[in-house]
Amino acid sequence: MKIALCIKQVPDTADIKWTENNTIQREGVESVINPFDTYAIETAVRLKEKIKDVHITVLSMGPPQAVEILKKAISMGVDEGFLVSDRKFAGADTVATSRTLASAIREKVKDVDLIICGQFATDGDTAQTGPSIAQHLNIAQVTYVKEITGYKDGVLTVKREVEDGVEILDVKLPAVLCMLKCDYEPRRSLINGFIKAHKAKINTYSMEDINLVPEEVGMKGSPTYVSKAFRPEQKQGGEAMTFDSAKAAAQFLLPTVKEYMIEEQVICKIGQE
Amino acid sequence: MGSLTHQYKRGKMEDEKEYKGILIYAEITREGDLAPVVLELANTAQELSQKLDGCEVTALVITNIDNLDEIKSELKYNGFDKVYIAKDEKLTDYSTSYYSKVAIDLIKEIKPEIVLIGASTQGRDIAPRISSYLNTGLTADCTKLDINEKGMLAATRPTFGGGLMATILCKNFPQMASVRPKVLKKADCPVEKDTQFIEVKPRLEGIDKKVELVEFIKNIQKAGKRIDEAEIIVAGGKGLKSAEGFKLLEELANALGGAVGASRAAVDAGWVDHSIQVGQTGKTVMPKLYFACGISGAIQHTVGMNASEKIIAINKDPKAPIFQVADIGIVGDVFEIVPELIEMLKN
């Protein structure tokens, strides 16, 4: 089984700093693998441990320094990795990004059986790239996946978490899975993994390498564009108050709490009518 | 690429009619009800329509339900001019392949200038599939929709965990946007329309479903309400110290008619289930009232709750960052203040 893993390098959101022009200060900001993608890696490696003849290729679209996260994935047990990087990719929205990734998978992984991504990236948080890759390749997709529970004769069984419960689904491969945070944690890299990652050769492919034209990638290939970016109005947090007793604090909160309770009941009544 | 063969050109295509009107994907829940987000979108669509010379607002219902009377009447009383209904036994359960095929076929036929979809799990599953097929833009999880001076959809959404807002425009048609449930308000006084109901025949022959639903296990809720639906959330963090600590929050939540939430620290400690985690790797919530009890307020948590209408924080540490987003901040012990509050609410 050939698995392609799509991962993304994101700024560590705990560490975001803003410039005076309301843009994100990229210099000196720690970059990490998108947290959801780490579960995608773990899920792929677990599948490789369970069934025979699994080969995992990890890829990312991004600047040259994204090689770091590909190496990290290799240190966790992924077989090989490549970077898709080209100045022409700059400004890509989800349609252009997913087209680029889909084309890279088609051209460089070839005959892929399974593509695994994170459900969201913590920077953009659109949750669109996975399903869009599936559409570009015209294959099945399952979003909000918690776990792969079985595999038999080209059909994967997966657990999907939705608002009102859990769905068990049979998915005919090839398919794209978008992973949520799993019930298991991504593994730590062991020393052997670091050695393998250090030795690994990571190829970088340009737009031409993956058989696309300028009209299909980057800003040119993106149907959307940002017309305005601004910082939201910050909530002015009040001073934290101290009370003489817990009772006094509760007494202070009571009117506010009651106000919202009443509103809640009114809404329920209207809803029932 | 396959997608490019379906590409639309902007505006009027030769010998074809212009893109006009607003289409709303009218999601039907597993129970067979109209998803509440549809009516929230309907209200905003009325405002957008007024800025677009009163263009038509239409809905697409994909289902296999026989009795659609209730759904039809909800749509009629919420200002829809036309409702397209695709009914087929293949459409009993949601299927990405089938549902997206039906939606794409209708969009190609009626050519709306705007398509709005609720950002539920179903909406987030189907919307990118449709937009990629049509090679058009989809702005996810918008918090505001407007029409700009050129008559185009201006969709505003938060990025970088809510730290930055971006207003996004789309070059192609239809312009697509998704909005999370409860972000927009449904109409206080909805408009009744002389709605035209139109049956559409789904063309699903030769379409491979690819994904089969084997089983559905419904959530058994411990504390009653679902966290993403609750108007009041009582959330706890590290300061709760144990699973036992959360019992106290459950008690408060019950007294208030709310749901219990948690920070990542409490989930990682194994005190509560991940399904109630609020924040970046959990859920985004926007209740009317959010209690943060013993939560320090790391940005990964606050991005998931800072859009709440009123935030009350109780924390022992006066320097806890949670106080920066709180409307009311109290320095104190959760285990002392919350029982007092529960007692007062009972009387």
Image: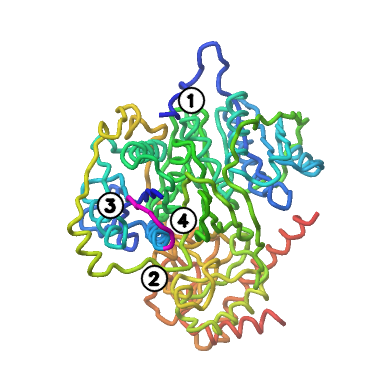
Residue visible at 54% across and 64% down? B310
Dot 3 and dot 1 residues touching (CB under 8 Å):
no
Marks 4 and 2 share the same chain: no
Give the structural element (helix, strand or loop) at label 4. strand
Marks 1 and 4 share the same chain: no
Residue visible at 25% across and 64% down? A193
Residue A132 magenta: no
Q: CA distance from mark 1 to mark 4?
A: 29 Å
What's the residue type where badge 2 is placed?
Pro
> How is the model colour-coded?
rainbow
The mark found on residue B6 in the picture is: 1
Give the structural element (helix, strand or loop) at label 3. strand
Mark 2, Cα crowd under 10 Å, few <14 / some 14-19 / many 20+, is some
The mark found on residue A69 in the picture is: none
Give the structural element (helix, strand or loop) at label 1. helix
Extreme-left residue of the structure = A199
Q: CA distance from mark 1 to mark 2?
A: 50 Å
Mark 3, Cα crowd under 10 Å, few <14 / some 14-19 / many 20+, is many
| Range covered by the magenta-colored residues | A50-57
Q: Chain of mark 2?
A: B
Q: Quadrant of residue B16?
A: top right
Q: Which residue is mark 3?
A: A80
Give the structural element (helix, strand or loop) at label 2. loop
Marks 4 and 3 share the same chain: yes
Q: Earlier in the sequence, mark 1 or mark 2?
A: 1
